[in-house]
Amino acid sequence: MTTQQMMAGKVVIVTGAGGGIGRDIALLMAREGAQVVVNDIGATLEGEGRNAGPAQSVVDEIAAFGGRATSNTDSVADAQGAEHIVQNALDVFGRVDCVVNNAGILRDRFFHKMSSDEWDAVLKVHLYGTYNVSRAAAAHFKEQGGGAFVHMTSTSGLIGNLAQANYSAAKLGIAGLSKSIALDLQKFGVRSNCIAPFAWSRMISSIKVDSAEQEARVAKIKQMTPAKIAPLAVYLASDAAREVNGQIFAVRNNEIFVMSQPRPVRSVHRGEGWTPASIAEHAMPALRSAFHSLDVSADVFSWDPV
């Protein structure tokens, strides 16, 4: 155990913590002194099935180095399940100080081929799941006059990616939800921030590799381990981050970014108002230089990970 533990005395819920990024966050939280609720339903990447093994395995890892943790297999996609997760923390550890909303599944498909079930399933786990657990914890945070939310967003939503309309919509929705939580709960000492992680995990391993370009991209991502994400998550959960609220960060190997949030970049004005024709003739040509191109995440983060 470390001598100066940033999370000593804190109780943290980490969803989707049976593997990948969630597991590494749970492990580092515990090493930094937190008592951890390791939540994972043990489903496949597509969200099928249940298995208590992954969550319990992480609890056993934490116990092996002297940390304290308990496993939970409730589903974040279900509001009652989310209530159970928070109650689990209260029953076992007596309080809750941080929620890390990390649970997720993928159902990648080009938009014109996407089914309603594929849309719903991803939204339910990512966006509804983040809402459900955050909502369940919010009353406790308010009552104790403090708490921290750390939500996992993605550059798939913040920037864009092919064949991920469901995932992208959910992840951009999480960024908006986080900002709203930060605004609504700041007066109670509650903070809410997002991390867009770049890491080779089970979720990323499903990326279709059908070109040399994609193969090169995946090779770069493999250098970025889930353990690289955990330090920022622990920091954002700790009292050291008390002044950090409503922000979106990205982590890529040894790089940490603060991401932009939408703001006006250029405007045009016409005293007599606009018509469709004058918009075509004047407004759009004047605004065009400020348009965003149809980038995907890899276009924006085009250099090799540092």
Image (tube, grey):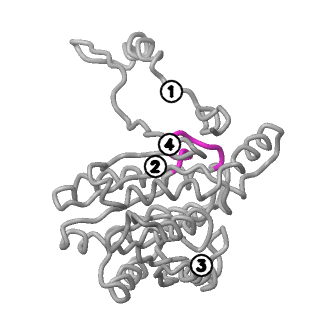
Classify 123 as above or below 281.
below
Q: Quadrant of residue 290?
A: top left
Residue 29 in percent (x, y) is at 46, 68
Q: Is residue 156 magenta?
A: yes
Residue for badge 2: 172
- Whether pointer 4 and pointer 3 mark residues with C-beta atoms closer than 8 Å, the reply is no
Amino acid found under the numbered disc labelled 4? Ile
Label number found at residue 256 = 4
In this view, the residue in front, 203 or 60, is 60
Lower position in the chain sequence, tag 4 or tag 3: 3
* Range of residues picked out in magenta: 154-163
Instruction: Please tell me whether mark 1 or mark 3 is closer to you in this view.
Output: 3
In what element is the residue under mark 4?
Answer: strand
Classify 21 as above or below 247.
below
Lower position in the chain sequence, tag 4 or tag 1: 4
- Which residue: 41% across, 17% down? 287
- Whether pointer 2 and pointer 1 mark residues with C-beta atoms closer than 8 Å, the reply is no
Residue for badge 1: 292
Classify 193 as above or below 98.
above
Instruction: Give the CA distance from mark 2 to mark 4.
Output: 19 Å
Label number found at residue 113 = none
- Which residue: 41% across, 73% down? 34
Q: Is residue 134 left or right of residue 119?
A: left
Instruction: Please tell me whether mark 4 or mark 3 is closer to you in this view.
Output: 3
Lower position in the chain sequence, tag 2 or tag 4: 2
Lower position in the chain sequence, tag 1 or tag 3: 3
In what element is the residue under mark 1?
Answer: loop
Amino acid found under the numbered disc labelled 1? His
Label number found at residue 61 = 3
